[in-house]
């Protein structure tokens, strides 16, 4: 009987420690970004970086400063700022892309950066900041 209680106590302590460690690592790894209006505010740093550098940059042939304003220090970018109109244009384009995928291609839960998207930035932009306009 005493051995069973000791085993239960040890298992409980180990389980509690494991849960506490997992919770601590999740909290320390999660970052709340400010002013995200299309992307989820709790997006991971890795996912955000992949969307920006693996999707947007090659699809539009631009770097970060195309949409993001220069910070007041003049040496970095102010990712929260909406000073550049290109940032709102990109939000509009992201919403359009998600809507097209959902409405016409029946993607159930379209998310920017997802491999399930049929229409992406690259569909129209093909590496150019301003896609060619169709001529009549």
Image (spheres, rainbow, N blue to C red):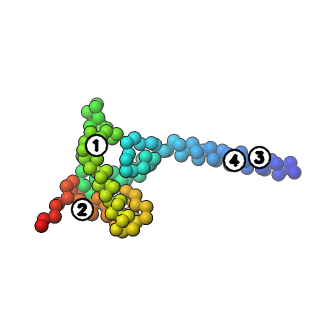
- Residue at the bottom extreme, as displayed: 105
- At a point 38% along the width and 64% down the height, the residue shown is 102
In this image, 64 relative to 17: left or right? left
Q: Which mark is residue 68?
A: 1
In this image, 89 relative to 51: left or right? left
Disc 3 is placed on an element classified as helix
Disc 4 is placed on an element classified as helix
Q: Which mark is residue 124?
A: 2
131 in relation to 21, above or below: below
| Position in image of residue 62 (x %, y %) | 24, 51
Disc 2 is placed on an element classified as helix
The residue carrying mark 3 is 9
The reply to whether callout 3 and callout 4 are in contact (CB within 8 Å) is no
The residue carrying mark 4 is 14
Q: Which mark is residue 125?
A: none
Q: Nearer the viewer, mark 1 or mark 4?
A: 1
Distance from the alpha carbon under mark 1 to that under mark 4: 47 Å
The reply to whether callout 1 and callout 2 are in contact (CB within 8 Å) is no
* 10 Å crowding of disc 2: few (<14), some (14-19), many (20+): some
| Position in image of residue 134 (x %, y %) | 16, 64
Distance from the alpha carbon under mark 4 to that under mark 2: 54 Å
Q: Which is nearer the eye, 68 or 24?
A: 68
- Residue at the front extreme, as displayed: 103
Q: Is residue 56 visible?
A: no
Q: Nearer the viewer, mark 2 or mark 3?
A: 2
Q: Is residue 71 visible?
A: yes
């Amino acid at each position: 009987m005493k051995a069973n209680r000791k085993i239960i106590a040890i298992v409980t302590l180990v389980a509690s420690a494991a849960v506490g460690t997992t919770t601590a690592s999740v909290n320390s790894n999660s970052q709340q970004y400010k002013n995200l209006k299309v992307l989820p505010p709790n997006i991971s740093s890795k996912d955000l970086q992949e969307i920006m550098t693996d999707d947007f940059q090659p699809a539009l042939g631009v770097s970060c400063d195309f949409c993001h304003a220069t910070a007041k220090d003049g040496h970095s970018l102010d990712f929260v700022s909406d000073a550049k109109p290109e940032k709102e244009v990109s939000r509009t384009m992201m919403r359009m892309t998600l809507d097209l995928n959902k409405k016409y291609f029946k993607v159930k839960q379209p998310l920017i950066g997802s491999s399930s998207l049929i229409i992406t930035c690259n569909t129209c932009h093909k590496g150019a900041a301003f896609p060619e306009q169709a001529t009549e």
